[in-house]
Amino acid sequence: MPCVSTPHPNNEPLLTVKQLASRLGCSLDWIYQRTRPGAPDPLPFIPLGRRIMFLWSEIEVDLEYRRACRGTLGATNGIARVKGKEKRLTRKRFQTGSVRLRTDSAAPWWEGFYREDVRREDGGVVRKLRAVYLGREEDIPTKRLAMRKLAEKLAPINDPTYRPGSEITLAQFMPKYEELRLATKKRTTQLGYKVVIAKHITPAFGKRALSDISEEDVQRFLNRKALDVAWNTLRNIKWAFSAIFTAAIKFGYAKHNPVRAADLPPEPVSKQRELPTTEQLQQLMDALDEETQIMVWLDCITALRPSELLALRRSAIDFKKKCLWVREAVNHGDLHTPKYHRQSRPIRLADADLARLQEFMAKRPDDPADAWLFPSEAGNTPKEYVNVLHRKIQPKAKKLGLPHVTWRLLRHWHSTVLQDSGLPVRVAQERLGHSRPDTTLRHYSHVSISKADEAAQIVSGMFGNRPS
């Protein structure tokens, strides 16, 4: 509330705004800011109609109070406690800035100037002069109105909670992000983020200061990308971009996240890929070499992620407990924990499958227990699942005229078989290594043609299949 005072009993002369500004050596706007309704740190004044007047004696008391409180400003919210009472304080370095009318264009416009504390990359703080566009002269006809417009822009800087921003660019921040934040992610997440950042984000914003990237800039960027990339890629771009700003805020290089509120276009209706039939998978396996055939067969019956399949060691096959233990995953030669909410998960195997694996492992009897089940030619590293897919599986499937085959589709086939068999979704969820059953149902389980035909017959039979 405005700090309204009453006339002094000793008939002390009242001061106008200009007279008070002259005594204080400040601008008129500084006084108007502190006498407006809702001012956080108001000056005591006397309203006389539409005018405001001041008593110098009360102003002196108020200034003395401010000076006494200034050294007690310890809280980040700008509240000082004096004599047991809280009082909101002004910033020690309050500024009003300056304006000038630019007439070097067809439409004259007002330009404002102010200084801002900026934190350098090394952590030091420098004070820089800033210029800002305030508006055209036809919209802001007087200098006083231009100063008021500038005061609105300076309000965050003059706020007691203000802290220096950073001028670090996105490209300069990226090594810090990779060292401090991205390094804590799993290898697969790191690779995905690095690809998205290097291909999409850095080319567009690498030279821009983090503090200069606005919500409008981000929305325009995503709208342009929506024309060139798939929806899932666009979503990944937003996730990675938002993660950068989240880290920048955490470590003091940014104040807000302009990506979080950005909108994505509606997710388009995607065509579900055709699953290979059991006969087609058998035809494919018959055409592959023995080791690759075992890989495809084992992935079909266990629904392992390819990174988990190729990271299997001989000791992972537990013949006593009749299961396979998923403990590791590998991506581009780097080992990491599986993408699962448990450190390891067992996948039960049938007796016939255990016998087939035992027969396959018996062909290398001298391999130790910690040897890779599918070693590379060097022997000390596992095979690369990408190379196996592109060089062996997909060329053979194309030659046979089979549907496009990927490691993921084999997991889809496994989930669909379990669903058609009537097993609870929880069983499929555990075997596929999903933390939530809705992931299994929404993204992995397909409706097979046989089950779709069965559903059609059931609903058709309700009406007796009578001809019209």
Image (cartoon, rainbow, N blue to C red):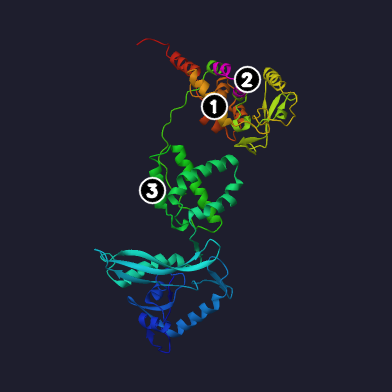
Ranked by sequence position, the earlier of labels 1 and 3 is 3
Range shown magenta: 283-296
Q: Which residue is mark 2?
A: 290
- Checking the image for residue 220, the label placed there is 3
Ranked by sequence position, the earlier of labels 1 and 2 is 2
Q: Quadrant of residue 352?
A: top right
Q: Find the distance from the CA under tag 1 to the CA under tag 3.
A: 40 Å
Query: Could you tell me if residue 281 is visible in this image?
Result: yes
Residue shown at the point (58%, 16%) measured from the top left = 286
Q: Amino acid at mark 1?
A: Arg
Residue 311 relative to residue 142: left or right: right
Which of these two is toward me, 466 or 446? 446
Relative to residue 408, is residue 35 depicted above or below? below
Which of these two is toward me, 240 or 150? 240
Q: Quadrant of residue 462?
A: top left
Relative to residue 322, is residue 109 depicted above or below? below
Neighbor class of circle 3 (other Cα within 10 Å; few <14, some 14-19, many 20+) is few
Q: Secondary structure at mark 2?
A: helix
Q: Amino acid at mark 3?
A: Arg
Task: Tell me where residue 167 appears, x and y as whole percent.
Answer: 48, 60
Q: Amino acid at mark 2?
A: Glu
Residue 384 relative to residue 13: left or right: right
Task: Tell me where residue 263 appears, x and y as whole percent.
Answer: 42, 45
Q: Secondary structure at mark 1?
A: helix
- Checking the image for residue 391, the label placed there is 1
Q: Find the distance from the CA under tag 1 to the CA under tag 2.
A: 15 Å
* Residue depth check, mark 1 versus mark 3: number of the one nearer the observer: 1
